[in-house]
Image: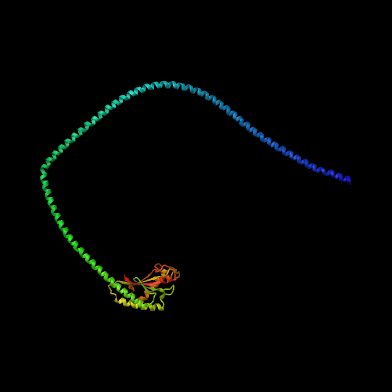
Amino acid sequence: MSSLRRRRSAFDIWPGFVDALTSLIMVMIFVLLIFAIGQFVLSDTLSGKNRALDALNARVAELAQTLSLSEDQKRALDARVAELAASLGATGSERDALRTQLDESSTEAARLGADVAALAALKQQLEAEVARMAAELDTSQADLVKQTDLTASASAQVELLNRQLAALNEQLATIQHALDIASEEAGIKDAKITDLGRQLNLALANKVGELQRYRSEFFGKLRAALGERSDVRIVGDRFVLPTDILFESGSAELGPEAQQRLAALAGSVREIVAEIPSSLDWVLRIDGHTDRRPIHTPEFPSNWELSTARALAIVKYLVVQGIPAHRLSANGFGEFQPLDPAGTPEAWAKNRRIEMQLTNR
């Protein structure tokens, strides 16, 4: 039994040893592979450097050959420069000689130019003198001809001028006389115009005063017709009454009580109309006003329509009561002419109004 156990222990060591040996071999193979790859890379790098070195050596050889050729060319150029320097020296001597000759020629040319300029100036002077003498000769001949002609016709021209001057003086006297008459007539017309203006102003003042008298009577009778109400008042030349006594809120229909009040008002207006002379072109304006609170209904999309409809309702009722339609005018101002700009209920009530104004057309 113990021998069997020892045999099994011996057999159990072997697989582990094999595994360890296999692993070691694989590691060695991997190291050798890395070494081989490194050798390959190093060899390739060295071969590339060798090729670059060969190329550099070839370039150095080319440069050395080029340098040798350049030295030969330099020697040839030095020889050419020496030849040119010798030629330049000879040319410099010739240039100095030519410069001397040129200076002498320039001096001679300057002297000849001065002589030519002097001769040209003398020629111009002579030509100017000849032209002046010719002009004087022509002028003398023309003066001689004119003097001869004037001697024959001077007396006739003077006589003609005297007759024309006398005729002009006569015409001037006639014009002055007509001007004096026109001034007198203008003064008379100005006086007439001033008098007519004074008469027209007087007539207008009488008409205005007469209309003012009927307007005052109109206000008094309307006040009596509507009764003693504290909210019915006169503002300037307008009779103002609140719409609350005539219309319901948001409505343009006259109720029974409103029609009763307007009937009394229409009676008063008829009495005044009967007394106003036909020469006065008057009209009774009915102006509708609202407060600034907006309204949006199918019948009245805005306060414009509401104020206009209320003024039209009063105008139509007055026409039915016998007031001439051509003496009535309906106007709607909406909320845009308030008496009180505040945003309080009291201000709104004051701004909801109907204004009646007896005025000229």
Callout count:
0
Q: From the image, which quarter does the C terminus lie in? A: bottom left
Residue 38 spot, x, y in % from top left: 68, 36
Q: Is residue 66 left or right of residue 29?
A: left
Residue 304 spot, x, y in % from top left: 41, 68
Residue 323 visible here = no
Q: What residue is rendered at 56% in x and 27% in y?
A: 63
Q: Is residue 166 left or right of residue 76?
A: left
Give the quadrant of residue 201: bottom left
Say how the picture is coloured.
rainbow
Q: What residue is rendered at 33% in x and 76% in y?
A: 220
Q: Between residues 339 and 144, which one lies in front from this camera angle?
A: 339
Residue 255 spot, x, y in % from top left: 41, 77
Q: Between residues 39 and 109, which one lies in front from this camera angle?
A: 109
Residue 63 visible here = yes
Residue 60 spot, x, y in % from top left: 58, 28
Q: Is residue 3 left or right of residue 148?
A: right
Q: Between residues 98 and 221, which one lies in front from this camera angle?
A: 221
- Farthest front residue in view: 230
Q: What residue is rendered at 82% in x and 43% in y?
A: 13
Give the quadrant of residue 243: bottom left
